């Protein structure tokens, strides 16, 4: 049985595409067949983050129009042969696709791929509804900001109404020093409002931006930045492993781990 | 908001009266003698002239949310009678309603409608149909506005998430949190067995006797009848159940323990 997971947020620019690219690569590196789907029609950029832009010939819209087979539209990644990308059309309007069509594409992919990750556009309009149409699970990405959390909460409500019951949380761009100084919500604060299980917390790290600009997801590189490890841990947790949450606050000198401080497990379902 | 009941704590009162709320009806589920009534808000304007602007996607969303929040309160497989009133429903929409119900282990059995097209669609889909004349449907309309007793309390078990608004012409009892960005508007009391962080309005039709109770009171705003208050800037260090009520000086909040006894 393949797992179809939509990565969504409500608010824009919080790290959905970055998370899709890195989690997708990390799961593929664990030996699974992965398809990442760009559902951000009109504003695609998953291909850029993956460094696959120049290999795109056909897009999902061409498949739906019957102009090519699904197989043909899938872009393979030579750095990670277990991952493929289904690109979105850049110059068509979002209305070029319907939820039913998305469902068809996804169930076609599900015949071959174990994990299908769908990168959702921001907002709760048609593009969002397309992105969630074929999904059975969701990963909500938020930053520790009030507006982002508010939108995430709203999206969780919509997902629940659409019978997507397995919803997990990624809190992105945490700055431990700011949390410490009470200038930023902690992961726990975010969780207390959203009341869904946490699957990962990613530190704010400029290497994420650098890797984005290079088209090379962080998890592919040699560097063992905390952010890369955090993404790998998300992949492991998705796979059912129990992995302790990182202590993002650990000073570089390798101080004593205070793992439970920020991510202490709350007895909430 | 942390003073004990003998010294009710003042909360900042906002002087101006809020706009008088209109209560467009929402999707409502009501248990009744071995069946569950699913009442849809009418398509025609309310008696007070305000339009009910619920579009189909909104109506569907509300139905799903009410089902998710109410599941525990009725038996599974209880037959559902859909009171569609003057709503036009096509076969696909009836199917979506039936699907939503069956996800909650409920079975759509009978459709009451005043619209011929809806009756035809329902019959074609195999449901028992009662086509009422518009006049009778109108008389049976729940909660006609004129001087009626409050509706039965509405029990919900859910997290009210941002963007969700619950309106009910009676008391609302919610087991769960009211998150920032959500709201509850009730003609009766509002009882939140959880954290209250959104906006709530009790006694929305003007009854200042109504109360708001919460295990943890951190509202964005409280309203009772035409009084408005917001919580202090700084949340208290410790929370305990509290009650908000109206005094001549505006809304006050007191510790819940012993509140009923010590009042007046
Ligand atoms: N952990 C992080 N640390 C630093 N920068 C980050 C981090 N995560 C994401 N970013 C940066 O934030 C920006 C937005 O990220 P991304 O494009 O993934 O967001 P998005 O949610 O997909 O946006 P959109 O809603 O526009 O699709 C990018 O420049 C990215 O490099
Ligand atoms: Mg994006």
Image (spheres, coloured by chain):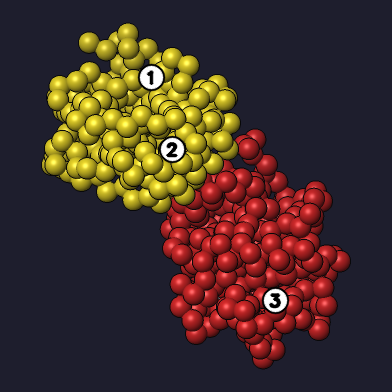
Viewer-side residue, B248 vs A171: A171
Viewer-side residue, A199 vs B165: B165
Residue B222: x %, y % from top left: 29, 36
Q: Is B257 left, or right, of B200 in this rendering?
A: right
In the rendered image, residues at marks 2 and 3 fall on the same chain: no
Which residue lies at the image location 71% right of the left edge and 66% below the top edge?
A: A108
Comparing marks 2 and 1, which lies closer to the viewer?
A: 2
Which residue lies at the image location 45% right of the left edge and 24% below the top edge?
A: B36
Residue A257: x %, y % from top left: 76, 53
- Determine crowd level at label 2: few under 14, some 14-19, many 20+ residues with C-alpha closer than 10 A: some
- Determine crowd level at label 3: few under 14, some 14-19, many 20+ residues with C-alpha closer than 10 A: some
Q: Which mark is residue B123?
A: 2
**Would you say the residues marked 1 and 3 are in contact, meaning their CB atoms lie under 8 Å apart?**
no
Which chain, by letter, is yellow? Answer: B
Q: Chain of mark 3?
A: A
Q: Chain of mark 1?
A: B
Which residue lies at the image location 37% right of the left edge and 12% below the top edge?
A: B258
Residue position marked by numbered label 1 in the rendering: B256
Q: Earlier in the sequence, mark 2 or mark 1?
A: 2
Please, which residue is most extreme toward the right here? A31
**Would you say the residues marked 2 and 3 are in contact, meaning their CB atoms lie under 8 Å apart?**
no
Residue position marked by numbered label 3 in the rendering: A70
């Amino acid at each position: 049985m393949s797992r179809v997971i939509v990565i969504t947020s409500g608010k824009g620019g919080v790290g959905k595409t970055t998370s899709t690219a890195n989690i997708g690569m990390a799961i593929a590196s664990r030996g699974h067949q992965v398809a990442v789907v760009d559902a951000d029609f009109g504003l695609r950029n998953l291909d850029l983050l993956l460094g696959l832009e120049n290999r795109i010939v056909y897009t999902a819209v061409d498949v739906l129009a019957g102009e090519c087979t699904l197989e043909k539209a899938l872009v393979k990644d030579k750095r990670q042969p277990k991952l493929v990308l289904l690109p979105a059309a850049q110059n068509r309007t979002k209305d070029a696709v319907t939820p039913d069509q998305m469902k068809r594409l996804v169930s076609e992919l599900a015949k071959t791929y174990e994990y299908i990750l769908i990168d959702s556009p921001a907002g709760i309009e048609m593009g969002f509804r397309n992105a969630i149409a074929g999904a059975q699970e969701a990963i909500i990405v938020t930053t520790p900001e009030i507006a982002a959390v508010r939108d995430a909460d709203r999206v969780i409500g919509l997902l629940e109404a659409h019978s997507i019951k397995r919803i997990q949380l990624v809190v992105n761009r945490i700055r431990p020093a700011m949390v410490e100084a009470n200038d930023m919500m902690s992961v726990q604060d975010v969780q207390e409002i959203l009341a869904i299980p946490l699957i990962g917390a990613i530190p704010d790290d400029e290497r994420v931006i650098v890797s984005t600009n290079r088209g090379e997801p962080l998890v592919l590189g040699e560097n063992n930045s905390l952010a890369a490890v955090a993404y790998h841990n998300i992949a492991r947790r998705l796979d059912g492993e129990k992995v302790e949450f990182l202590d993002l606050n650990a000073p570089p000198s390798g101080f004593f781990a205070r793992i439970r401080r920020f991510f202490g497990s709350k007895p909430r379902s | 908001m942390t003073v004990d009941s003998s010294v009710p704590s003042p909360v900042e009162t906002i002087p101006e009266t809020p706009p008088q709320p209109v209560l467009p009806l929402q999707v409502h589920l009501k248990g009744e003698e071995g069946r569950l009534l699913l009442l849809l808000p009418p398509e025609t304007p309310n008696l007070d002239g305000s339009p009910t602007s619920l579009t189909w996607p909104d109506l569907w969303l509300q139905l799903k949310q009410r089902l998710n929040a109410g599941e525990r309160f009725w038996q599974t497989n209880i037959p559902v009678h859909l009171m569609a009133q003057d709503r036009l429903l096509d076969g696909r929409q009836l199917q979506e309603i039936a699907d939503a119900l069956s996800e909650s282990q409920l079975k759509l059995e009978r459709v009451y409608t005043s619209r011929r097209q809806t009756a035809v669609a329902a019959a074609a889909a195999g449901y028992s149909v009662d086509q009422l004349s518009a006049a009778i449907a109108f008389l049976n309309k729940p909660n006609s506005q004129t001087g009626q007793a409050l509706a039965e309390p509405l029990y919900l078990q859910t997290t009210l998430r941002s963007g969700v608004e619950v309106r009910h012409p009676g008391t609302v009892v919610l087991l769960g949190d009211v998150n920032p960005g959500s709201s509850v508007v009730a003609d009766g009391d509002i009882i939140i067995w959880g954290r209250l962080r959104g906006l709530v309005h009790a006694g929305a039709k003007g009854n200042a006797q109504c109360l708001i109770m919460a295990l943890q009171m951190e509202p964005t705003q409280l309203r009772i009848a035409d009084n408005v208050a917001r919580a202090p800037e700084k949340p208290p260090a410790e929370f305990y159940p509290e009650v908000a009520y109206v005094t001549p000086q505006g809304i006050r909040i007191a510790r819940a323990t012993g509140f009923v006894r010590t009042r007046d």
